[in-house]
C-alpha cells in the first residue's frame, strides 16, 4: 500500500500543482463500481467517513458508487450513505451527503471548519483529475452575504445560508466537479456545488460546511 501511495504522490508531483499534494490525501473521488473516471469529489473527515455533495447521491445510484483513495491505491465500498433530507435540487440548499466506508481509508483526515471565513480569505479547491493528478485551484472566499450582494454574479434570493462562494484566482482554472472539498486554514470550509467555474468575476457557489455541522455530527 505504501508503495502505491508513493506512486500517486509522484504522479501528482509531475503535474503543475506539485507542492501541496502530500498534505491532501484526505481528498478522495467517488466513482462507479465498474471503474472509470471519478464522478464526484469527496473528503475524508474520519477514517470511514466521506463528505460529498447531495447531488452525487441523488443524480447517481449510490448503490453503485465506491470511493477511491489516493488515486485508486484503495477502492472502498460503501457500508452506507445518507444525504440531508432538506437538500433542494432547485435552489441547491443543503447540498451535503455522507458516505460510510466499509473499511478504513489509509489516508489523512481533515477537520471541519467551525466558522465561515471572512470574504477575502484564501481557499483551495482540490479534486482528482481523470488522469491521476490531484488538481488544486486557488480561490478567494466570498461570504454568504457578500456573495448574494450582486457584486459576484448572484442575488440574495439565490445564495442561501448553507452556501459560501469563491472566485478563482487563475482565470484559466475551474473549481471542478461537485463534492470537491474547499480547504482554508487546514480545515474543510466547503464543497463545490453549483454556479460554474468561479472565473470572470462570477463566483462559484459551495456548500457551506460550518452551517451544516449539526447535520454532519448527527449523521456520523
Ligand atoms: C489523460 O486524459 C486524456 C483525455 O482525457 C487521455 O486521452 C489520455 O490518455 C490520458 N492520459 C493518461 C496518462 O491517462
Ligand atoms: C492556471 O490554470 C491553468 C489551467 O488549469 C494551468 O495550466 C496553469 O498552470 C495555471 N497557472 C498558474 C499560475 O497556476
Image (cartoon, helix red, strand yellow):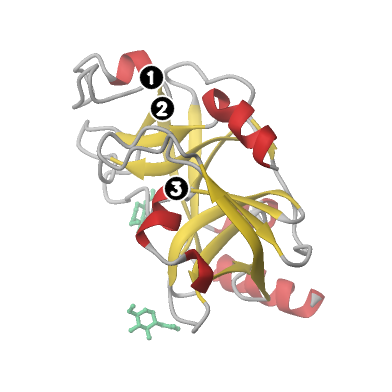
Secondary structure of the residue carrying numbered label 3: helix
Label drawn at residue 204: none
Mark 3 is surrounded, within 10 Å at the Cα level, by few (under 14), some (14 to 19) or many (20 or more) other residues, namely: many
* Disc 3 from disc 1: Cα separation: 19 Å
Confirm whether residue 37 shows in the render. Answer: yes
- Quadrant location of residue 189? top right
Closest to the camera, between mark 2 and mark 3, is 3
State yes or no: Cβ of the residue under disc 3 lies below 8 Å from any atom of ligand 2: no
* Disc 2 from disc 3: Cα separation: 16 Å
Residue designated by label 2 = 164
Q: Are marks 1 and 2 in contact (CB under 8 Å)?
A: yes
Residue designated by label 3 = 54
Residue designated by label 1 = 144
From what the image shows, is residue 194 above or below residue 31? above
* Disc 1 from disc 2: Cα separation: 5 Å
Secondary structure of the residue carrying numbered label 2: strand
Indicate the quadrant containing the N terminus: top left, top right, bottom left or bottom right: bottom right
State yes or no: Cβ of the residue under disc 2 lies below 8 Å from any atom of ligand 2: no
Q: Nearer the viewer, residue 109 or 48?
A: 48
**Which residue is drawn at the image coordinates 43% and 75% (left, top)?**
37
Amino acid at each position: 500500500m505504501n508503495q502505491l501511495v508513493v506512486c500517486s504522490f509522484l504522479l501528482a508531483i509531475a503535474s503543475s500543482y506539485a507542492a501541496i499534494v502530500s498534505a491532501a490525501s484526505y481528498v478522495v473521488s467517488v466513482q462507479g463500481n465498474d471503474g472509470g473516471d471519478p464522478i464526484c469529489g469527496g473528503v475524508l473527515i474520519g477514517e470511514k467517513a466521506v463528505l460529498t455533495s447531495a447531488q452525487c447521491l441523488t443524480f447517481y445510484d449510490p448503490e453503485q458508487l465506491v470511493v477511491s483513495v489516493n488515486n485508486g491505491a484503495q477502492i472502498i465500498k460503501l457500508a452506507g450513505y445518507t444525504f440531508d433530507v432538506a437538500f433542494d435540487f432547485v435552489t441547491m440548499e443543503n447540498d451535503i451527503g455522507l458516505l460510510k466506508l466499509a473499511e478504513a481509508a489509509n489516508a489523512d483526515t481533515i477537520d471541519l471548519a467551525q466558522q465561515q471565513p471572512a470574504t477575502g480569505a484564501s481557499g483551495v479547491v482540490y479534486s482528482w483529475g481523470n488522469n491521476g493528478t490531484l488538481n488544486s485551484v486557488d480561490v478567494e472566499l466570498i461570504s454568504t452575504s457578500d456573495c448574494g450582494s450582486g457584486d459576484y454574479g448572484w442575488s440574495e434570493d439565490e445564495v442561501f445560508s448553507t452556501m459560501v462562494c469563491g472566485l478563482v484566482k487563475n482565470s484559466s482554472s475551474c473549481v471542478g466537479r461537485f463534492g470537491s472539498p474547499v480547504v482554508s486554514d487546514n480545515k474543510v470550509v466547503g464543497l463545490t456545488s453549483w454556479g460554474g467555474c468561479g472565473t470572470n468575476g462570477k463566483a462559484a457557489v459551495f456548500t457551506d460546511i460550518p452551517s451544516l455541522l449539526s447535520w454532519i455530527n448527527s449523521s456520523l
